[in-house]
Amino acid sequence: MKLITPTFYKSFACIAGDCPDSCCQGWEVDADEESLSFYKTLSGSLRDKIDNVLDKDEFGNTIFRLADNKRCPFLNRENLCDMHIAIGGEHTPYTCRTFPRFINDFGGTREMGISFSCPVASEIMWNLEEDFGFVSEINSLPPSLNDIDAELYFNLLSYRKKAYSIVQDKKLSINKRLLQLLDYASELQKELDNYRENASDVSFFDLFNNPEVINQQWVEKVKNHNITPVFPKDKVCENIAMYFLFRYFLTAVYDSDVLSKVKMAVIGVLIPAYFGNDAWTIHLWSKETEHSDVNMERYKFELKNNIHLSVKELKKHLV
């Protein structure tokens, strides 16, 4: 399999107990089938604790029931994982083993990156001075089974390459690049599928009041938002837009919705411009939205349907 990662991918390292916003608190962790099978082979106090905290969420998924202050039941006072200490990181749930990495498989190609939801990853991408570039390597993993449209996939690869070049065109201000990006995506969308932008009229700032709250700090940031946007420096905005294009653009192979993926890149830049000009702000947004099924599904709906997130309205935030 061909593996594609950002050039800075291998520089990420978890800081464990020193993390200012541990990934082991705030959200529920799914217990995947492979991990559950292994836990059945255990005995003693750890097995008892695992059995006592397993639960079902509203979707029927098996999860670890959170302790006080929304902490994982295995997160100890030193903010270290007792399960990791006892049986090794390779036997923790899949989510724990991979976070903050995301994985997108497209047949013989796998794309992996790190998410803004991790404070360390957020700082890396926020402060990246070199271009947000990529490296590829060949590993021994077999291709993933899929039913994607090969022609659409390869077209999207070409379209994304063009989108990258627009975002990284340093001859233009970031605002002009994003305006150009929206126009480009609008034309692409006309070729792919119909697109409606008037089925929801939730106001722009109310869109960021997620139904599932993970960290109250985000609620306060939305409440105290800037009236007019204060953009970070162009390089930071460029990095943010590139992250969203890399993570989401090719997933249009499943729904032919390129425009929503590009809107995410533009809104990604608007997040620190309105809610706080630092890596912490976009970290909070990412943890609230990208890692909550409830919040993310709502966000995807609004991206495609909300009149205040139409291309016409988004452009008003960039001029």
Image: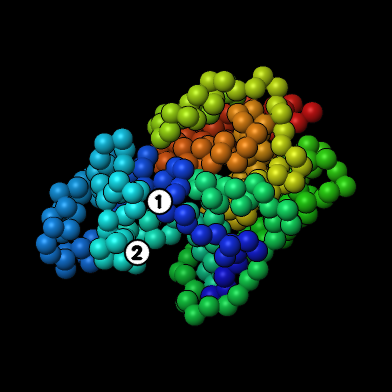
- Which three-letter amino acid code belongs to the residue tagged 2? Gly
In terms of image quadrants, where is residue 42? bottom left
- Residue 17's label in the rendered image is 1
How far from the left and from the top, in percent, is residue 117?
A: 50, 45
- Tell me how far mark 1 sits from mark 2, CA to CA: 15 Å
- Which three-letter amino acid code belongs to the residue tagged 1? Gly
Q: Residue furthest bottom?
A: 140
Residue drawn at the location 62% of the way across and 37% of the way down: 278
How far from the left and from the top, in percent, is residue 90?
A: 34, 67
183 with respect to 60 (left or right): right
The crowd level at tag 1 (other Cα within 10 Å; few <14, some 14-19, many 20+) is some
Residue 122 in sight from this viewpoint: yes
- Residue 89's label in the rendered image is 2
Q: Is residue 284 above or below residue 149?
A: above
In terms of image quadrants, where is residue 274? top right
Residue 33 in sight from this viewpoint: no
Marks 1, 2: nearer the viewer: 1
How far from the left and from the top, in percent, is residue 217?
A: 47, 29
The crowd level at tag 2 (other Cα within 10 Å; few <14, some 14-19, many 20+) is some
Residue drawn at the location 63% of the way across and 61% of the way down: 8
Residue closer to the observer: 200 or 215 = 215
Dot 2 lies on which element?
helix
Residue drawn at the location 71% of the way across and 37% of the way down: 232
Number of numbered callouts drawn = 2
Residue drawn at the location 79% of the way across and 28% of the way down: 319
Dot 1 lies on which element?
helix
